[in-house]
Amino acid sequence: MQTDQELIDRFQQGDESTFDELVRRHEQRIRALCGCYLSDPQDVQDAAQETFIRAFRGLPSFRPEARFSTWLFRIAIHTSLNQVRSRRRRGWMQAFSRLPGMEDQIVTSGTGAPTPLEEVERAEQQRLIRAALDSLPEEQRTAVILHRFHGLKYQEIADATGSSLAAVEARIHRAKGRLAVLLADYMKE
């Protein structure tokens, strides 16, 4: 199997069909990332598609100073945030409807299926976490989402957001402090 860089090299030499393989490799993670910012599934699809359109257009000049996936994350973040800002201007922005990985954070009954009480608790947990994340400044929210829900290391977040490593560290530290305050009552239960 060819590496991303080998596919990019072939693309830059004129073999545009290699882009299909890059999309297949990264589509799920890009959709999940867009889903952290956008609540409507169609908006998520549109943002992911726009991300790949922008990547296709920018790939001829791509230089491997950062990993392809990091560069793609950066495009997806900007595309999603632009869509969020556009919706806010129109006045109908909704809160996050789901966050990747959240469904794994509630204990289920011994049968494997959540009980009605567990489902209510899970929905409340997700609502509280969404509200807390939504209240963070944009840069902090992005850093936390990339770190917690997508498993990126601090340097990868810095590359994806065009920030310094120190800025990412500070954003995550501040966000954790703010989230601890916002979720303190919930954590006591």
Image: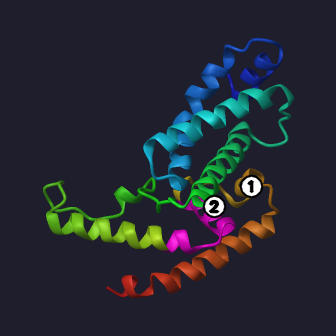
- Residue 143: give x, y in percent of width and height: 65, 63
Residue at x-position 57% and y-position 30%: 25
Instruction: State yes or no: residue 130 in magenta.
Output: no
Residue ranking furthest to the front? 90
Q: Classify residue 36 as left or right of residue 109.
A: right
- State how the image is colored: rainbow
Quadrant of the frame with the N terminus? top right
**Callout 2 secondary element:** helix
Q: Classify residue 166 as left or right of residue 186.
A: right
Please tell me the numbered disc located at residue 74.
none
Asked if labels 2 and 1 touch by Cβ distance under 8 angstroms, the answer is yes
Residue at x-position 51% and y-position 52%: 38
Residue at x-position 15% and y-position 64%: 116
Q: Residues within 10 Å of mark 1 (few under 14, many from 20)?
A: many
- Provide the residue designation for mark 2: 142
**What's under tag 2, amino acid-wise?**
Thr
Say which quarter of the image contains residue 72: top right
- Provide the residue designation for mark 1: 161
Q: How many marks?
A: 2
- Residue 28: give x, y in percent of width and height: 51, 37
What residue span does the magenta drawing correspond to? 132-148
Q: Is residue 96 visible?
A: yes
Q: Main secondary structure of the magenta part?
A: helix
**What's under tag 1, amino acid-wise?**
Thr
Residue at x-position 56% and y-position 48%: 33
Instruction: State yes or no: residue 140 in magenta.
Output: yes
- Residue 149: give x, y in percent of width and height: 52, 57
Q: Classify residue 165 as left or right of residue 183.
A: right
Q: Is residue 1 visible?
A: no
Whether 65 is drawn above or below 172: the answer is: above
